[in-house]
Image (spheres, rainbow, N blue to C red):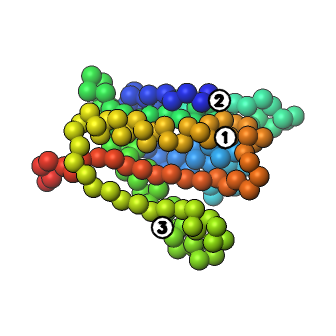
């Protein structure tokens, strides 16, 4: 697995993520070093056969790869955990593909955040205090917003390598989420 951000504009590759099972599988594999189809299926509530089907699609489009065999087991791992899905005006269908994946991704992150807040009263106070929900509104040019978007993408770079190498995780570290969206209000909402 590499730690370099990959820009993906190909509509077929983007659309491969427009499925809730695939997003859950990719998310799960991003938090472990590797897992078999059976382990993935158990983690996301799917049968091993269904998990295997969706894992092969993720492999076909370059999101995951086979890890070295463990005896008879054939585990999977994330190929690159850091990618940027962005439409390319020169590539027909890339905008629609990004819109479809964004809808799934937004819903997934919304539900995950709602689950955190619904159960925060059962978490140790140190983790509650370390978490945040923040909003900001401001005026910006497209260039300034583009720079802010790059800054947000890089904000977690200090944690690079911890997906693939558990020895880089300090004691007490928990798998943590950051969800950020920076966008202007629509000019002509319909």
Q: Is residue 124 left or right of residue 93?
A: right
Give the CA distance from mark 2 to mark 1. 9 Å
Residue pictured at 32% horizontal, 35% vertical? 146
**Crowding near the residue tagged with mark 1, few <14, some 14–19, many ≥20 C-alpha atoms within 10 Å:** many
Residue pictured at 45% horizontal, 62% vertical? 133
| Quadrant of the rendering where the N terminus is positioned | top right
**110 vs 138, nearest the viewer:** 138
Give the CA distance from mark 3 to mark 2. 31 Å
| Quadrant of the rendering where the C terminus is positioned | bottom left
Q: Which residue is mark 1?
A: 163
Tell me whether the residue at label 2 lies in contact with that at label 1, contact meaning CB atoms closer than 8 angstroms: yes
- Sequence-earlier tag: 1 or 3: 3
Q: Is residue 138 left or right of residue 25?
A: left
Residue pictured at 32% horizontal, 56% vertical? 136
Give the CA distance from mark 1 to mark 3. 24 Å
Q: Is residue 25 above or below residue 79?
A: below
Secondary structure at numbered mark 1: loop
- Sequence-earlier tag: 2 or 1: 2
**Crowding near the residue tagged with mark 2, few <14, some 14–19, many ≥20 C-alpha atoms within 10 Å:** some
Q: Which residue is mark 2?
A: 1
User: Which residue, as the protein is rendered here, is positioned at the far bottom?
Assistant: 121
Q: Is residue 94 left or right of residue 52?
A: left
Q: Which residue is mark 3?
A: 114
Q: Is residue 185 left or right of residue 52?
A: left
Q: Position of residue 11 (x, y in %)?
A: 38, 31
**59 vs 33, nearest the viewer:** 33
């Amino acid at each position: 697995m590499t730690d370099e951000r990959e820009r993906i504009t190909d509509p077929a590759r983007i659309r491969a993520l427009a499925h809730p099972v695939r997003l859950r599988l990719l998310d799960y594999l991003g938090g472990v070093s590797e897992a078999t189809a059976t382990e993935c299926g158990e983690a996301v509530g799917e049968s091993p056969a269904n998990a295997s089907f969706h894992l092969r699609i993720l492999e076909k489009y370059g999101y995951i790869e086979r890890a070295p065999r463990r005896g008879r087991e054939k585990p999977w791992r994330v190929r690159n955990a850091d990618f940027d899905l962005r439409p390319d005006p020169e590539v027909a269908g890339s905008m629609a593909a990004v819109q479809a994946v964004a809808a799934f991704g937004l819903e997934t992150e919304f539900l995950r955040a709602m689950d955190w807040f619904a159960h925060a009263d059962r978490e140790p106070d140190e983790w509650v205090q370390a978490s945040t929900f923040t909003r900001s509104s401001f005026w910006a040019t497209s260039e300034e917003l583009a720079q802010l978007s790059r800054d947000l993408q890089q904000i977690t770079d200090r944690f690079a390598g911890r997906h693939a190498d558990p020895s880089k995780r300090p004691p007490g570290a928990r798998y943590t989420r950051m969800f950020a969206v920076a966008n202007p209000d629509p000019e002509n909402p319909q």
